[in-house]
Amino acid sequence: MPYTIDVNPVIASFGGLAVRWYGLTLLAAAAVAILVFRHETRRRRLDERATSDGIWWVAIAAIFGGRFLFELQNEVAMLGAHPLHVFMVWEGGLSFYGGLIAALVTIVVFARRRRLQLWPVLDAAAPAAAIGQAIGHVGCLITGDSYGLPTTLPWAVIYRNRAAMAPQGVPLQPTQAYEAIALGLLFAVLWVGRERLGRLGAGAVAGSYLIALTGIRFGLFFLRDEQAVFLGLKTAQLIGLGLAIAGTAILAGLIRRRLAAAAFTTKEMARP
């Protein structure tokens, strides 16, 4: 029996200001991600003042980077006619990878300007990003954003509220729930394994996050109601391939360095 979601995306309105479920879950996601990130920066003995300053720049970049790519992919006409529409994030509609790429670029720039060690900062950010993204997808599920293809599965979701972003009365794959669960599990794995991954070297947690994240989303996008653009793949899958290559390169470099160090040690010990 499909599950019915009949929730108005707007929780309440105060004059001209609408409080939306999407915005509320974004705030919750950001709050939890910040707590996780600050815990990790303290554990790694990074400059707390500098990293705290960077949080806000990264958050702003992620939101507007996600919004911009979403508008570019889905509402080009609206973006051309009303450029300021890109700032209306409370209406819903964020591109996951747009936000991620904007956040990564901001971290790189900020780390260089504040003379922070880049790889430890990225390692601290990876589990924070995973849990924040997991919570954010709950908002997508409530409002009908990022919905899946029609299905006959018994756990399908049907949207009844006319203000939802998804089609009405059609059983759909709950891809938002799939992604929230998968990203929550990714956070748990990174959190439990962060010290073991750290033995490979700085950057191992971030590289693992990129590979696992793109693997999750690459598979789930076959269930998403979006148009293929190249070789049967969708835009997010193509972007994900690039990020997966970057993550693989990071881990491969660390493993190669570790093997080279082990070979050198063995050679030195074998000398008479």
Image (spheres, rainbow, N blue to C red):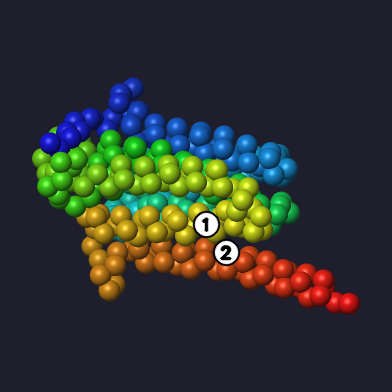
Disc 1 and disc 2 in contact, CB within 8 angstroms: yes
Q: Nearer the viewer, residue 67 or 149?
A: 149
- Give the total number of marks visible in the rendering: 2
Q: Residues within 10 Å of mark 2 (few under 14, many from 20)?
A: many
Q: Of callouts 1 and 2, which one flags the residue occurring earlier in the amino acid sequence?
A: 1
Residue at 23% x, 30% y is 8
**Mark 1 belongs to which amino acid?**
Ser
Residue at 23% x, 62% y is 227
Q: Quadrant of residue 170?
A: top left
The numbered mark at residue 114 is none
**Residue 261, relative to residue 221: is it above or below?**
below
Query: Residue 146, how many percent across, how many down?
Result: 28, 48
For the question of whether residue 257 can be seen, the reply is no
Residue linked to disc 2: 251
Quick one: SS at disc 1? helix
Query: Residue 128, how many percent across, how many down?
Result: 53, 43
Q: Quadrant of residue 203?
A: bottom right
Query: Residue 171, how many percent across, how many down?
Result: 14, 44
Residue linked to disc 1: 208
Query: Residue 206, how many percent across, how many down?
Result: 56, 55
Residue at 34% x, 22% y is 14
Q: Nearer the viewer, residue 80 or 127?
A: 127
